[in-house]
Image (cartoon, rainbow, N blue to C red):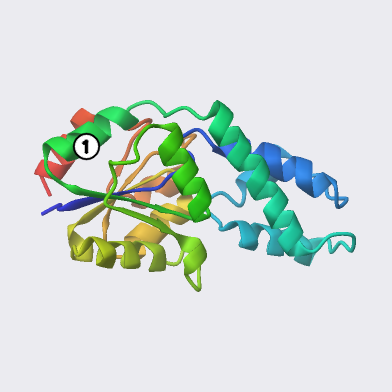
Amino acid sequence: MIEAVIFDMDGLLIDSEPFWRKAEMAVFKTVGIELTEDDCRQTMGYRLNEVVDLWYSRKPWNDKSQKQVEEQILAHVQNLIETEGVSLKGVMETIALCQELKLKTAIASSSALPLIKATVRRLGLEETFDVLHSAENEEFGKPHPAVFIHTAKKLDVRRENCLVLEDSFHGMIAGLAAKMKVVAVPEVSDQRFGSAHLTLDHLDSKVIKAFISSH
């Protein structure tokens, strides 16, 4: 029985993936790394420090610390969220469904907590979620299940009674590894998402309601 719904954030609640790509390409360029949008897509679902560590390991730079690069990307993305962020199709209807069914709700994201809070403010959802949890506080980020496991603990709900809504492959793997039900909402069609319990083109509250009632 589903008792809680755990939302990813980037690319699911808000169309922030283009913000991340824009920020990463701009900031990494300042340290001599020219990234394409496809390069950035390869790290969707990763924590920011993991993205910076990855590119540093491949093409080390000297003029800025890795922490400075992280902070500049984070600031760039937060500014874009606060000025341009909009909710994705079906988000508000799905949140209303959770409220109708009296389900607990949470955000479990690889993004830093300040970005999660900025997104919630931007979308006017400050009073909506029971838990906001960032993988920055975990030893390992997605696809490790820790962020979802600890979110379930904070919600005081058994893992098997949680439904995860995810757009990234690494997030889907994390949700499945946490022994939760997973509805995947990938940006583009990808056969790798066949492992999810259900795959949608966008958040569809009617389909999600039927899924919840059958589980």
Name the residue: 63% across, 62% down.
49
Q: In which quarter of the image is residue 37?
A: top right
Residue 188 lies left or right of residue 66; in this view the side is left
Name the residue: 85% across, 47% down.
30
Residue 129, x across and y down, in percent: 29, 46
Disc 1 designates what residue?
208
Q: Quadrant of residue 150?
A: bottom left
Whether residue 145 can be seen here: no
SS class, disc 1: helix
Kind of residue sitting beneath label 1: Ile
Residue 109, x across and y down, in percent: 44, 53
Q: Assign the N terminus to one quadrant of the image.
A: bottom left
Name the residue: 15% across, 44% down.
212
Q: How crowded is mark 1: few (under 14 residues within 10 Å), some or many (20 or more)?
A: some
Between residue 162 and residue 23, name the one nearer to us: 23
Whether residue 193 can be seen here: yes
Residue 111, x across and y down, in percent: 52, 52
Residue 192 lies left or right of residue 199; in this view the side is right
Residue 38 lies left or right of residue 140; in this view the side is right
Q: Is residue 34 above or below residue 159?
A: above
